Amino acid sequence: MLKVKIIFFSILREKLNLRETFIECEKNTTLIEAIEILQKKIDIDNYDIKSCMFAVNQNYVENNYILSDDDEIAVIPPVSGGSNVIE
């Protein structure tokens, strides 16, 4: 079994009232499979998670990325702000 750390950022961290959690998964688990395990563990709205970007060990990766023991997944919701007016 692999142990993987999940870190939440921004509005998702506030909405879940959770900074981080851990999941256990089988060897050769992909990122998207780990996210499915996470969704079963905690109550994350499917819309919220589908709009997020994911980084593993501080690098953006594809959904089929194979996880390793002690990997760290960052769940990064979309951000916005500022002005769209260019002067």
Image (cartoon, rainbow, N blue to C red):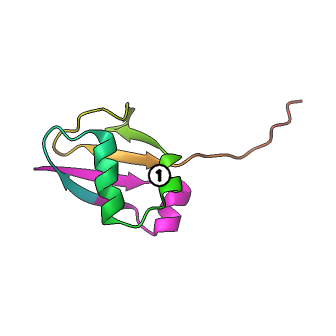
Residue lying at the far right in this picture: please name it.
87
Residue lying at the far left in this picture: please name it.
1
**Along the line of sight, which residue is nearer the eye, 5 or 48?**
48
Question: According to the image, label 1 marks what residue?
Answer: 49
**Along the line of sight, which residue is nearer the eye, 61 or 44?**
44
Q: Position of residue 20 (x, y in %)?
A: 35, 60
Q: Quadrant of residue 62?
A: top left
Residue depicted at x 37% and y 37%: 58
Q: Is residue 6 left or right of residue 75?
A: left
**Along the line of sight, which residue is nearer the eye, 53 or 81?**
53
Q: Does residue 37 sit above or below 41 in this rendering?
A: above
Q: Quadrant of residue 65?
A: top left
Image quarter hosting the C terminus: top right
Residue type pointed to by label 1: Ile
Q: Does residue 77 sit above or below 56 in this rendering?
A: below
Q: Position of residue 74 (x, y in %)?
A: 39, 46
Residue depicted at x 19% and y 46%: 70
Total marks drawn?
Answer: 1
- Residue 82 counted in the magenta span: no
Q: Is residue 61 left or right of residue 86?
A: left
Q: Does residue 55 sit above or below 15 in this rendering?
A: above
Residue depicted at x 36% and y 35%: 63
Residue lying at the far bottom in this picture: please name it.
17
Residue span colored magenta: 1-21
Q: Position of residue 80 (x, y in %)?
A: 67, 46
